[in-house]
Image: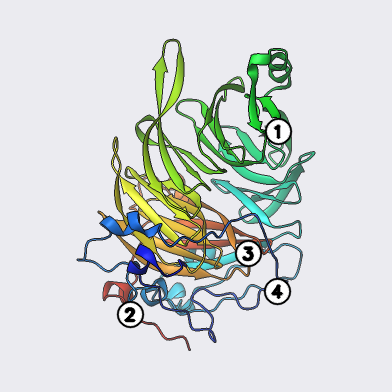
Amino acid sequence: MRESGGSAAMLAEPSKYPGDHPLPHSDPMFKYSAVTDDDFSNRHSSSSAAAASSTGYSSDYPSCASGECTPYAMSPWNQTVSPYYSSPWAHHIIASAGYDDQDNDNNGDSGDGALAGTSLIGSLVREEGHIYSLAAKGDMLYTGSDSKNIRVWRKQQDMAGFKCSSGLVKAIVIAGDRIFTGHQDGKIRVWRASPKNPATHKRVGSLPRLKDFIRSSLNPSNYREVRRNHSALWIRHSDAISCLSPTEDQGLLYSGSWDKTFKVWRIADSKCLESVAAHDDTVNSVVAAFSGLVFTGSADGTVKVWRRELQGKRTKHVAVQTLLKQECAVTALVVSPTAPILYCGSSDGIVNFWEGERHLSHGGILQGHKMAVLCLAAEGNLVLSGSADKTICVWRREGGAHSCLSVLSGHTGPIKCLAIVDDQLEDRRHHPGAASTSASWIVYSGSLDKSVKVWRVSEEAPQALLRGPQHVPVA
């Protein structure tokens, strides 16, 4: 939450959660020993709200930027779910509150897929360290932790794992048949599953390639000063990899680093095409997006827009717009897959968003967290924000308006990463002519409590929310 003073006073604080009761979708039985973490910054600013409050929301709809419309007040669910762990890792199907087994029998549905609405499905626990990164595709999930291990899960079951030689796993992305992992040691490693045994993953390379590194090191002009009295090759990050973003249509991979740069890699031959000195502090997020644009967010409090342009026989990324300048750190960026909208999470707990294909304009803010926003994810009309306050806010976009559908809680540590997959993809594969129901998604949330929680999230607004925001007492 922002400190009072300056223009930040224009944003009212959300109502406090009842301290003596579990939050919606809470998991009070989760056993966990407190953790501390210095990996995320919770820098506060008394002036960073100026840009956010200048445009704001339309007054014709309720938003969580107002003090009387908090995510808790807008969330109609009242349920408590508690997976019980009987082994180092577990998957438990938990029915959402209000789900009637008799109704399930009457309508002929059965099994896990019958769960309705938004609910906690289960938890994946492996005592290997804090969860820092996630990547999901279909029924496969990859998780990265500070144990240097990458775990592989299929249908919420522990399937396999592979370990790198060094470097905490800070980022994971999937591009085609390859998995790219970014590490604390500044290296990007490339993995591929065995076609004969999907549980077996082999390392097939790294970025940059060793031969490129050796060749470049022979030319003094390939060195750049990275700090006082210290230089490094431009084709290699000199500090931790913080983020990765692939563009499969262009065959490129973007990497952001604590060394204040982002680099552009060609996936086909693992060649570094360009290195851009983008910010004055850590690059926390890079997103390759629509119209050939690339967005970067940094601990220096700025969000910048870059365009890839052809210059002679080579391409170069040129800065075309600075969307945000503030004192608090920018921690996460995500682009909506269904509209030209960029969302930005900050260490003050605010989510800003901008709209437009070529020149973006500020659309408003989403305020629902008491602490830093550490991660964002978007699919369909939904945007999810994970926070150091241990909750996930689920926002739905309708036109230019956003409303908070629910607040997911259950983690006992800060939420570092989110991943979303289509819950109905398998149904459409097996029944292509079947009528489509309301969109629902499987959401994975990774936390510093060393667990991954699995949620089913629906885009459909609950009836209580359709009647307008209201306070839901917890029994």
Left or right side of 204 for 76: left
Q: CA distance from mark 1 to mark 4?
A: 39 Å
Residue 437 in sight in this render = no
Residue position marked by numbered label 3 in the rendering: 123
Q: CA distance from mark 2 to mark 1?
A: 54 Å
**Viewer-nearest residue: 112 or 163:** 163
Which residue, as the protein is rendered here, is positioned at the far front?
A: 228
Q: Tag 4 or tag 3, which sits nearer the N-term?
A: 4
- Viewer-side label of 1, 4: 4
Work out whether 185 lies above or below 363: above
Work out whether 304 lies above or below 471: above
Element on which disc 4 rests:
loop
Q: Amino acid at mark 1?
A: Lys
Element on which disc 2 rests:
loop
- Viewer-side label of 3, 4: 4
Q: Does the CB distance between marks 2 and 4 fall below 8 Å?
A: no
**Viewer-nearest residue: 411 or 431:** 411
Q: Position of residue 121 (x, y in %)?
A: 55, 65
Element on which disc 1 rests:
loop
Q: Tag 4 or tag 2, which sits nearer the N-term?
A: 4
Residue position marked by numbered label 4 in the rendering: 31
Q: Amino acid at mark 3?
A: Ser
At x 28%, y 41%, the residue is 356
Q: Tag 3 or tag 1, which sits nearer the N-term?
A: 3
Residue position marked by numbered label 2 in the rendering: 470
Q: Amino acid at mark 4?
A: Lys
Residue 157 in sight in this render = yes
Work out whether 296 lies above or below 421: above
Label count reads 4
